[in-house]
Image (cartoon, rainbow, N blue to C red):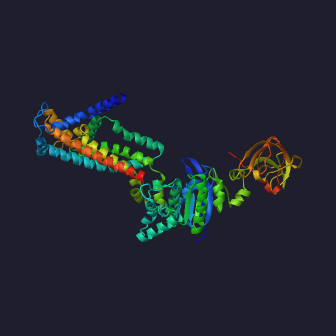
Amino acid sequence: MMRHLKRLYIGIVFFFLYAPILILMIFSFNKSRYMSKWDGFSLKWYADLFSDRDIMSALYYTLLIAVLSTIIATVIGLITAIGIHDMNKLGKGIMVNISYLPILNPDIVTGISLMMLFVFMKLELGFLTLLLAHITFNVPYVIFSILPKLRQMNKHLYEAALDLGATPFYAFRKVILPEIMPGVVTGMILAFTLSIDDFVISYFTTGAGVSNLSIIIYSMARVGIKPTINALSTLLFISVLLLLLIVNKRTSNNNGKEKVI
Amino acid sequence: MSYETINLIDVSKTFDDTLVLDNINLYIRRNEFLTLLGPSGCGKTTTLRIIGGFEEPTTGKVLFEGKDITHVPPYKRKVNTVFQRYALFPHMNVEENIAFGLNIKKISKNIIEEKVKNMLGLVNLRGFEKRTVDSLSGGQQQRVAIARALVNEPEVLLLDEPLGALDLKLRKGMQIELKNIQQKLGITFVYVTHDQEEALTMSDTIVVMNEGHIQQIGSPIDIYNEPKNAFVADFIGESNIVNGIMIEDYVVDFGGYIFRCLDSGFGEKEKVDVVVRPEDIKLVPPEQGMLKGRVLSVIFKGVHYEMMIESNGIIWKVHSTLMEPVDTIVGINIFPDDIHIMKKVMVS
């Protein structure tokens, strides 16, 4: 009896978690343009998607912004994390809290304040400001993915490398970076996902002609939901899922290797 | 080339206003096995880190073969370190760990392979080339750490409590092995430990440190037999330390009896510390003893018994192969050779 209840409970949890996505995916293959009835299988919304110039341009900007902001935020976050790690206790406490604030700050506040800053600096809202905004909100996530790895690391590893004749940069490249790489990768994926995901901050910091997917979906939805949105969302969902699966496999492989041999 | 490899001249170090090293002067001879010995927090590890280049002294100089290396970074020093808990690179296998230093020097692949192989032979780890660091036992990791440092053929090898994490039996074995390696390669070893027995077993020279000061420098035999002050006496081996008064040269009053001793040059009626090793106290029938005492407790220690004996309000620790039961009245004799007189140290 208890076992069945447990299974039922798990079932309900998964149903609520995945049913919306499942429905969205199913209806992306619906021939009808209405959600209320199923007219049979079709790929025409996917075809529509790739012929829609607005959507393709939004996809292009979304990916470009995601890739660039991820790379830049990772570099900045990595350097910052190492800097914070080397500070004394007081400095570390202050820096950690300052870096944490943007994560807790509501998106809408971050978005509006960034917009005001850009306007104040007389930067024209557009691609550059959107990129800067994404880098800004990504950096703390990278920092907090890397810091725990630095803390776990034997603090004498760096000194051991120097002791064996490595210059500080060589020691960083050959010893520290491989040690904290899992944290760096986690931070990168987090940053990439957040960048693709973001609507609120992007909405306030971009300008005419530069929209990402979430902005396009929002403006389309205001007019009325077309199944192309379903198709687009399905593709996004699957790409993110694949990315996560790859990362999972990678980390479990690594763990396995350490244990088996 | 000078006879001294490393010289520390007036080295002091403060961390956040705490004085960790206070005016250390020390020279390390070529090819000697020198041990920095002291309780935790005495500054021995800081001294080692200053020699390794991981800390800069607040004041003072470090000389290497006569040249000032005070501000030379670790990667430019001909010194290698075996770290506490080894600090092996976890993402590299045994071979890659050992070859790390050689790869930096851009030596040809064949020579590196050859040297790594020789090193593995030296530390008894043949066949472990491809093993991951995690799969090794503590003792094996220790050997890799030693090989990784030695393969660079340093002039001086620094070892920071390298055996601290090993169990007693393994530690004894490694002590002998380390000493053999040192003698075989003829490298100067600077060894940090808080284990006095380890220091006595392995060293040519022991530097006893406490609270940032050098207490005594000498050979193990000197330090054991002629401790310079009560701290050294207490730290090196077990000791009875009691208050005494010098009556005149070669005569000292302590424990309720006036003893003859070998020390002179103290002031008349000067208060002194008297140190007597537990194994130097001879138990005799009560009527033959200089002091009379009552046995308070007896513990069997394997080779000998440890007895606490009370006499005139002083409790003496005595090691003897013969057991006297509790409450027995015994006689205590201490001969002039075994009485060590020390000036009182003003303890702050």
Front in this rendered view, residue B218 or B166: B166
Residue B139: which quarter of the image? bottom right
Q: Measured along the vertical axis of the image, is residue B143 above or below residue A196?
A: below
Q: Is residue B339 visible?
A: yes
Q: Measured along the vertical axis of the image, is residue B145 above or below residue A243?
A: below
Q: Name the spot of residue B143 as percent of width and height, x first.
A: 52, 59
State which quarter of the image contains the N terminus of chain B. bottom right
Q: Name the spot of residue B316 as percent of width and height, x first.
A: 77, 46
Q: Measured along the vertical axis of the image, is residue A216 above or below residue B46?
A: above
Left or right position of B42 against B154: right
- Say which residue appears at 39% left-offset and 57% top-offset: A173
Residue A49: which quarter of the image? top left
Query: In this view, which residue lies farthest toward the front?
Result: A1
Residue A30: which quarter of the image? top left
Front in this rendered view, residue A255 or B6: A255
Left or right position of B177 against B250: left
Q: Name the spot of residue A109 as percent of width and height, x first.
A: 29, 35
